Image (cartoon, rainbow, N blue to C red):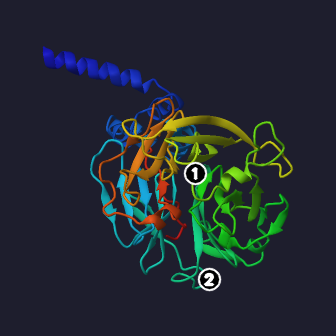
Amino acid sequence: MVMQTRSTKKRQALRLFSSFTDDLLNEILIRLPDSKTIARCGLVCRRWWELIHSQHFKRIVTHHHIHQRHLLPHSLLIKLYKDNSLIQTTKNTSHNILYKNLKIESTFDDLLLIKGETDGFYISNPLTHQSFKLPKPPHLFMLRTIYTCGLVLYPLLDRFRVVLLTIASVTVYCSETGQWTMREDIAKTLPEINQRETFQNISVRRVIDEPPVAVNGRLYWTLFGMVRGVRGVVSFDPLNIKFRFIKLPYVIGSNNYDIDQFLQLSVSSARIGVVNGRLRLARSYPLANMSIYTVLKVWELVNDDDINEVVNWVLVYDVKVKGDVNSHLSMDNYRIIGLCPNLEGDEFIFLGSSSRTASRFALYHYKIGRIGFQQHHHKIFPYDFDFKFRYKLPYVFAPIHLPIPTKIPMLPSV
């Protein structure tokens, strides 16, 4: 009798689901929490299996999560400049993995752009173990040329671009053709704003200091002056092969750019990141010499279309943060190194001295509204660093975990 009741309920449920249109089923399935749950739904019946594995379903899932990515969990990949090492750490684990002979160049959602020690560039998805080796660029710069590179994915178009920027050229890989295109003239005209607030041509060497971030189909770099100091932000559109220079935020109540404060070289640091699909610029510096407080300012870019637009930035946060709430150590050795892509955009990663010995650094986490910093993980770094480490800061990548892992677009013949 019990078996008959269960069988009857199952038939009734199947009859109900069979009355759902494909559009309604799509709207239900794309809201499931992860790919494993979606895959299990494919076992319900043949119709559901075919629906879930269709290209149309993959496109609408991608479109849905493009607008929901700020709700997704993420990892933190800490790139160190000593031995090209990488530390992976997440909020939910206490262990850290140190990768050797591997260089993370850029990330986009859950994809990594990786450079091997000797065999060129790869695009990889660590969750699916899918990887794609890029052909060698047209110029043999792999070992010694100073460069920076970034990855931009266009999910709705099922294509991607990889950009290599050197001192002399910009080279773009097109996923549709499988070819690199090199331009030797465009990078030489990259403008900066100098101390007199006028445009002049500069060497791309001033951009090649940190990896770029990708948002809305563009790559963004912080632009540094001849002496280390932030001069502005540079954007690059890989589809149109076009650079654009973005000035720094204005000082509130002034017609002058915030250059002087950005150029407090020994005590100031700045990072860009993507939060809720918008580019943000965060800057930190001690409140005063030997102060126990750090000032954190965060701006959001609201316009990247009109080169003549004056007001590009909106101030989002301007807070004063105490260091270790149980100590009175100076905050001169604390630097912001990353922004977390959480919903509120109110979490940041700092590097700071963990003791009175300035050469011993630790990773700290700060959330807007808290009294002070919290150490992210005890003894996160496998070794100590000297004073030079302060001037070549680690870089934080924050790949997100999509419910359906991103599939790397391939050439039709691949």
Rendered residue at 48%/77% (across/down): 120
Q: Position of residue 109 (x, y in %)?
A: 50, 50
391 and 64: which is toward the camera: 391
63 and 225: which is toward the camera: 225
Rendered residue at 62%/59% (across/down): 265
Answer above or below: position of 265 versus 49.
Answer: below
Q: Residue 93 carries which label?
A: none
Rendered residue at 46%/39% (across/down): 366
Where does label 2 land, which residue? Answer: 138
Crowd class of label 1 (few under 14; some 14 to 19; many from 20; radius 10 Å): some
Is 347 displayed left or right of 216 in the figure? left
Instruction: Mark 2 vs mark 1: give the one in front.
Output: 2
**In the orientation shown, which residue stands out farthest toward the left?**
1
Instruction: Specify whether residue 72 is in view.
Output: no
Q: Where is residue 70 in the image (x, y as percent from the top left)?
A: 52, 38
Q: What element carries label 1?
A: helix
Where does label 1 land, which residue? Answer: 155
Is 118 displayed left or right of 160 in the figure? left
Q: Position of residue 354 (x, y in %)?
A: 37, 50
**In the orientation shown, which residue stands out farthest toward the bottom?**
140
Q: Quadrant of the N terminus?
A: top left
- The reply to whether the C-beta atoms of the residues labelled 2 and 1 are less than 8 Å apart is no
Rendered residue at 44%/36% (across/down): 372
Answer above or below: position of 54 versus 126.
Answer: above
| Three-letter code, disc 1 | Pro
Label 2 vs label 1: CA separation? 26 Å
| Three-letter code, disc 2 | Pro
Q: Position of residue 80 (x, y in %)?
A: 43, 64
Crowd class of label 2 (few under 14; some 14 to 19; many from 20; radius 10 Å): few
Q: What element carries label 2?
A: loop
414 and 384: which is toward the camera: 384
